[in-house]
Amino acid sequence: MSNQKQQETPPITFVAAGDTELEREAILEEVLPSPGFPAVAQLVVDAIEKRSEVTVLDFTPQQVNIRFQIDNVWHTMPTMDRETGDFMLATLKRMAGVDYRNRRAHQEGSFRAEYLRVKHSCQIISQGVRTGERIALYIELPKSKVETLSELGMPKSLQEKLAPVLGSDDGMILCCGVPNEGYTSVWRGMLTACDRFLRDFYVIEEESRSEPEVINVTSVLFNEKAGETAFTPMPRLMLKQPNVIAFAEADQAQIINQMIELSEKEIFVPVRIPGKHAADAVARLILCKPDVKELAKQLRAVLCMRTIRRLCTDCRQPFTPHPTLLAKLGLPAGSVRQMYKAFEYEPGMLDENEREIDPCPNCHGIGYVGLTGIFEVLTVGDRFRQAMIQTPHVDHLLAAARTESHLSVRETGVVAVAQGITSLEELQRVLKK
Ligand SMILES: [Zn+2]
């Protein structure tokens, strides 16, 4: 390896695939002098610094297109010429222990990387496609420990609104969100907020879809493939005289009716279902055709969380919102003096002195760093209950909630925009989905 190349390579170390130390070292020795090695090192460092959990490389006859997924959003990166790309891919595959000559078959492999004293396990999946070859590189990134509703970003006022519901002796609460976007986090956050230490608390989960346990909540599994349902474990569970039985999913009328019945027997029943906002979740549940009258009677509240990217506080751009914008957002004139936009960095950008701008060292030019939640806590009142029974369409449910001075997820999102936590563009992106 020439000294030249060593200087170009960022300070990252790798542990290649292999069953023995000898094997792993042999592979590394083989790839180190390769012209593809600095490119791999640069790619992995870029992905780690920008916090890309999934990196997709598309090899076309002319070039390599690179995309990073950061905080659930795809970003297109500068393309790479095909020659560099081919050397890089051969090195990447060799390190992951898969056949680098085979560019058609589906192959999976893994290696490890250490950068700035943090270890990352990296997995690659390669597959030949019509236009060439596609590679997905998954890099495990350190996750900040987010367990409680406060840590997820729920304001105190909403926590106080939710607390009496979570302390109920009976009835139901729905917990909703969009799968893969904080769906598990809000469910865990809600269970964590319940007084798990004072009550006997169980979560019913399908075996193959079970999630990491919450402290002081016993997970009870059933096996769908073996013909079991969420109520198969119930006779045994009832002997333990539970106070709270939570269900991680609900999609069949018969099962939902059993949950409703359970919530009439001095058992509090949290249920999780997908939904873009509270009214959407209730409309979806009603579409499963349960006994709506009983459901309306037993449903105490709906909690919804959507995830939104946080603006980078180092490079966000302040602006004075026009009064018409504030009016459109439902904010009183003069209530917000400053809002923020993300700084949209592009390589080669010049400042007022015609000097090239470096990307922001905090967000690496993305404009956002990490995610936070925007929440909705709908406590079910008479008008909402009536709408559930008579006109269970999303629009009617939304209108009924509004008459009960309920703040929707859009409205709590606008508060986050007014506080400079996120941007209007980001809120619109999240709500459009
Ligand atoms: Zn920044």
Image: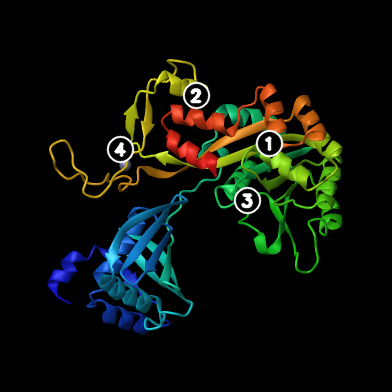
Task: Determine contact: label 2, label 3, CB under 8 Å.
Answer: no
* Left or right: 162 in relation to 116: right
Which mark is in front, 1 or 3? Answer: 1
Residue bearing the label numbered 4: 315
Query: Which numbered disc, 1 or 3, marks the residue that appears first in the sequence?
Result: 3
Which mark is in front, 2 or 1? Answer: 2
Query: Which numbered disc, 2 or 1, marks the residue that appears first in the sequence?
Result: 1
**Label 3, label 4: how far apart the Cα atoms are:** 37 Å
Residue under the point 31% across and 63% down:
43
Can you tell me whether the CB of the residue at mark 3 lies under 8 Å from the nearest atom of ligand 1? no
Badge 2 density bin: few <14, some 14–19, many ≥20, Cα 10 Å: few
Query: Which numbered disc, 4 or 1, marks the residue that appears first in the sequence?
Result: 1
Residue bearing the label numbered 1: 279
Residue under the point 35% across and 23% down:
320
**Label 2, label 1: how far apart the Cα atoms are:** 22 Å
For label 4, the SS is loop
In the rendered image, residue 243, in percent from the top left (x then y), is placed at: 78, 43
**Label 2, label 3: how far apart the Cα atoms are:** 41 Å
Query: Which numbered disc, 2 or 4, marks the residue that appears first in the sequence?
Result: 4
